[in-house]
Image: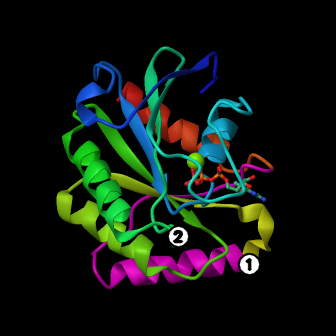
Amino acid sequence: MIIKSAEFLCSNTQVSKLPTPVLPEYAFIGRSNVGKSSLINMLVDKKGLAKTSQTPGKTQLINHFKVNDKWFIVDLPGYGFARVSKSSKEKWEKFIRAYLTKRENLQCVMVLIDSRLTPQKVDLDFINWLGDQGLPFVLIFTKADKQSKGKTAQNVELFKNEMLKQWEEVPQLFITSSEDGSGRDEVLQFVDEINSG
Ligand code: GTP
Ligand code: MG
């Protein structure tokens, strides 16, 4: 897919105020600091479109972007940020769950996993919830530039094995780096296939 345009549309805290669901939508979600906003910028080749930060918890709202006037990208706040209170964690969960289960144009949830880490409970819990809801999702391993290919492959394998304890199959997965652009073509092709499908 060639990216001709990518623009910011709006930020929201309320599901009722989201843009009219007229285009296919892809939501990027994962732990705080996993690299959601960076990956979005890498995919659309526009640095600074989605706000990134070294400090976890940067993205706080549901942010909509329109790509090629044909599809929506959604940047979501991260989960698993240790320094938030229990009540704001619950608020996050309610709001994200409402968004994910009610958004009728949502094609696929793009779940980002830090490729440097062994499987984390918070990611597996979230994925199990997605599976229980019957929501389509893929796994995108991030920050692959930070270690050897072998180490990444090892963590991916461990993650697959954890998933197979709960589910009969693993979803499609991608290995990416926002730093060197790896995985970009594969993710965009995946989106293209759904959009034209
Ligand atoms: P929140 O919005 O806080 O949930 O974080 P996020 O998941 O959007 O992460 P963000 O894109 O802001 O990136 C967090 C940090 O990781 C930043 O310092 C990025 O520069 C860095 N980062 C993200 N992706 C990569 C990557 O592929 N490689 C490397 N080396 N660093 C990355
Ligand atoms: Mg972010």
Q: Are marks 2 and 1 in contact (CB under 8 Å)?
A: no
173 drawn magenta: yes
On-image quarter of the N terminus: top right
* Lateral position of residue 93 relative to residue 35, left or right: left
188 drawn magenta: no
Q: Nearer the viewer, residue 59 or 107?
A: 59
* Lateral position of residue 72 relative to residue 7, left or right: left
Q: Which residue is mark 2?
A: 83
Structural crowding at the residue carrying mark 2, measured as other residues with C-alpha within 10 Å and reported as few (<14), some (14–19) or many (≥20): few
Is 75 located above or below residue 23 in the figure? below
Residue 121 position, x and y percent, is: 42, 80
**Amino acid on which disc 2 is placed:** Arg
Query: Callout 2: helix, strand or loop?
Result: loop
Q: Which residue is mark 1?
A: 150
Instruction: Please give the count of numbered marks on the rendered protein.
Output: 2
Examine the image and state in which quarter residue 144 appears: bottom right
Residue 39 position, x and y percent, is: 63, 46
> Magenta stretch?
151-179
On-image quarter of the C terminus: top left
Q: Earlier in the sequence, mark 2 or mark 1?
A: 2
* Lateral position of residue 195 relative to residue 134, left or right: right
Residue found at x 33% / y 22%: 19
Residue found at x 56% / y 56%: 57
* Lateral position of residue 168 relative to residue 33, left or right: left
Is 27 located above or below residue 115 in the figure? above
Question: Which colouring convention does the figure follow?
Answer: rainbow
**Amino acid on which disc 1 is placed:** Gly
Q: Which mark is residue 60?
A: none
Is 23 located above or below residue 136 in the figure? above
In 3D space, how far apart are the residues under numbered discs 2 and 1 (Cα atoms)?
32 Å
Query: Callout 1: helix, strand or loop?
Result: helix
Is 59 located above or below residue 70 in the figure? below
